[in-house]
Image: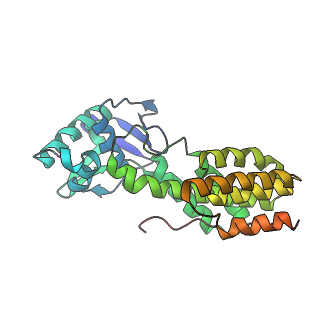
Amino acid sequence: MNNGEITGAGGSEPRTLSVGLLGPFTVAVNERPVSLTAGRLRALLAALALSAGRVVSVDHLAAGVWADEDSPANVRRSVQTYMARLRSALGAGAIGSTPAGYVLRTDPERVDALRFVRLLNAASAAPDGVAGRPRLVEALKLWRGTPFEGVPSGLLEKSEAPWLLERYLTALEWRLDLDISAGRHGDLVVELCELTARYPLRESLWARLLVVLDRSGRRADALARYETMRTRIATELGVDPDPTLQRIHIDLLTRRTPLVSRRCPVCPVQGS
């Protein structure tokens, strides 16, 4: 397999297959969108795409498509039936089979979730944050919304979406820290206001919002935001803000300038 190409029916037609998982589910062959109207087809392809180029067992595929309570009597036969439908939609060469399971024949770079992880690893391996920032930004641009949107799979929602979202948020916070270090405080206020509204219980985002408000000369706004956040956390979680936020609050009250750690927070690849 070269450059993400797969072989079409009859072995003569080269095709490229792309799958989007970091937002509304998408699939394209030769850059043309393919519509998979059956939810189980989307779930099956999503499970295959997360391991593009590697064999996935029938049992794992079945777990991604069916909940325990609605699992078919003959799982292997049902998976074979859906695989035939996928091949019909994507091309006969798109999916290979082995005694151990099935493999999606496409370059992992053409699956946005896998490309996202590779770019983050490359950014983390850079000699410093400034050198890694272009790959970091490129990785973050791949996100289009909630992972696996339109893919009815409890397994993917529970076991894959959470760690992908956490890697996204920690990568985003790393990029925010680089921009704070570069003095782009005013540019970050609107972005962080939107992010704290989207993830209101993620205290590390609130911490960065307080910092950029303070460094933009808006200390009173920062204190008001802290109180908004403190009230919400107390109401919804029944706890006080974490120690980092409390220290920033004290710094604001005593008119010292709070700092955010510039250490790269991106974790290793899940399961590696």
> Is residue 24 toward the left or the right of residue 241 in the image?
left
Q: Residue furthest left?
A: 73
Residue 210 at x, y = what percent? 76, 57
The one nearer the camera, 20 or 248, is: 248
> Is residue 102 toward the left or the right of residue 119 in the image?
left
The residue positioned 26% from the left and 37% from the top of the image is: 87
The residue positioned 79% from the left and 54% from the top of the image is: 222
Q: Quadrant of residue 211?
A: bottom right
Residue 159 at x, y = what percent? 38, 56
Q: Please say if 249 is above or below 231.
A: below
Numbered label tally: 0
The one nearer the camera, 181 or 258, is: 258
Residue 254 at x, y = what percent? 87, 68
Q: Is residue 105 visible?
A: no
Q: How is the image coloured?
A: rainbow
Q: Quadrant of residue 10?
A: top left
Q: Please say if 235 is above or below 36.
A: below
The residue positioned 61% from the left and 56% from the top of the image is: 233
Q: Quadrant of residue 86?
A: top left
> Is residue 246 toward the left or the right of residue 201 in the image?
right
Q: Please say if 100 is above or below 256.
A: above
Q: Is residue 41 visible?
A: yes
Residue 56 at x, y = what percent? 28, 55
The one nearer the camera, 185 or 49, is: 185
The residue positioned 62% from the left and 67% from the top of the image is: 265
Q: Please say if 237 is above or below 189.
A: below
The quadrant of the image that shows the C terminus is bottom left
